[in-house]
Image: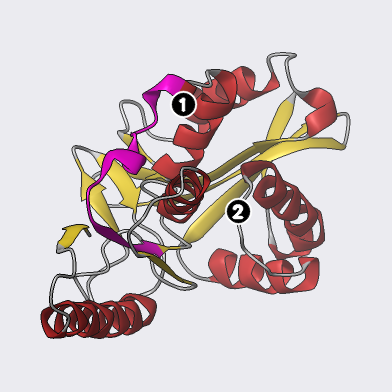
Amino acid sequence: MRWRRATADDVHVLAPMNARLIQDEGHRNPMTVPQLAGRMAEWLRAEYEAVLFEDEGTPLGYALFRRDPDAIYLRQLFVEREHRRRGVGRTAVGLLLREVWPAGSRITRPVALTRLFLDNRRNKAQPDAEIRVEQIQGSVMMFSGKKDEIWPCALMASRAAERLRRNRHPYPVTHRSYEDAGHWMPCVYVPTAGERSGMKLSIGGTPEGAAQAQADCWQTILRSLNGIGSRKGSPEPAAF
């Protein structure tokens, strides 16, 4: 296996692999292959570099990275499906460390914990670990971001609401889920990614989506509290 630096002429090779990477990760990115090609071309013109891994001219995978002042930021690393479990990925990383990046480089990459959680959940289902939400003695109000990359809160809140319905929960149950919100809805217009403990961490969503979600969920909470206060004998909210 050999490696070579990708150029603008390789965008037509990189973009379809990028699309397959998005599919493999279960990401919601709706971009088409031509759109991904355009984005890849912009990245290569700007601050990113790409390396193609090949075997006698056949592309096996690629790496996309950026040289930051204190680290190598590895944004994407992909191996074609038919070449996996053959040591290609391990060999590719070895080539990057020995021949592409400076010796001793610190490597960082974005971490989307939601995918890790879901992968672990698929491999090790633990139904007994679910919170027994039906034991809540009062109304339940849940808010979630559909693009949360820390924890799949939209999925888990939907499961909680379904569990409450299945157990005939006698109190009101509300679940509002926001399309472009990530993990931190209360904190608006903050970066949707950053570094924590040496890891590039992604919380998902957009700052605008978080702001819209916060505005809506706060008004929903106020309406609920006002409604409870106006009804004598109504149960107080037990969980938000």
Q: Is residue 224 placed above or below 181 in the rendered structure?
A: below
Task: Residue at 33% x, 41% y: name it.
Answer: 133
Q: Position of residue 195 (x, y in %)?
A: 23, 49
Q: Nearer the viewer, residue 95 or 81?
A: 81
Q: Position of residue 83 (x, y in %)?
A: 80, 24
Is the N terminus in the top left, top right, bottom left or bottom right quadrant? Answer: top right
| 51 part of magenta stretch | no
Q: Is residue 132 placed above or below 224 in the rendered structure?
A: above
> Circle 1 is placed at which residue position?
97
Please tell me which of labels 2 and 1 falls first in the chain. Answer: 2
Task: Residue at 60% x, 50% y: name it.
Answer: 50
Location of residue 52 by image quarter: top right
Q: Are there few (<14), some (14-19), or many (20+) residues within 10 Å of tag 1?
A: some
Secondary structure beneath dot 2 equals loop
Q: 48 left or right of 109?
A: right
Residues at discs 2 and 1 in contact (Cβ within 8 Å):
no
Give the extent of the magenta segment: 128-144
Q: Nearer the viewer, residue 174 or 193?
A: 174
Task: Residue at 52% x, 45% y: name it.
Answer: 166
Q: Position of residue 192 (x, y in %)?
A: 32, 65
Is the C terminus in the top left, top right, bottom left or bottom right quadrant? Answer: bottom left
Colouring method of the image:
secondary structure
State the CA–CA distance, disc 2 to disc 1.
28 Å
**Amino acid marked by disc 2:** His
Q: In the rendering, which numbered label is found on residue 27?
A: 2
Task: Residue at 13% x, 77% y: name it.
Answer: 232
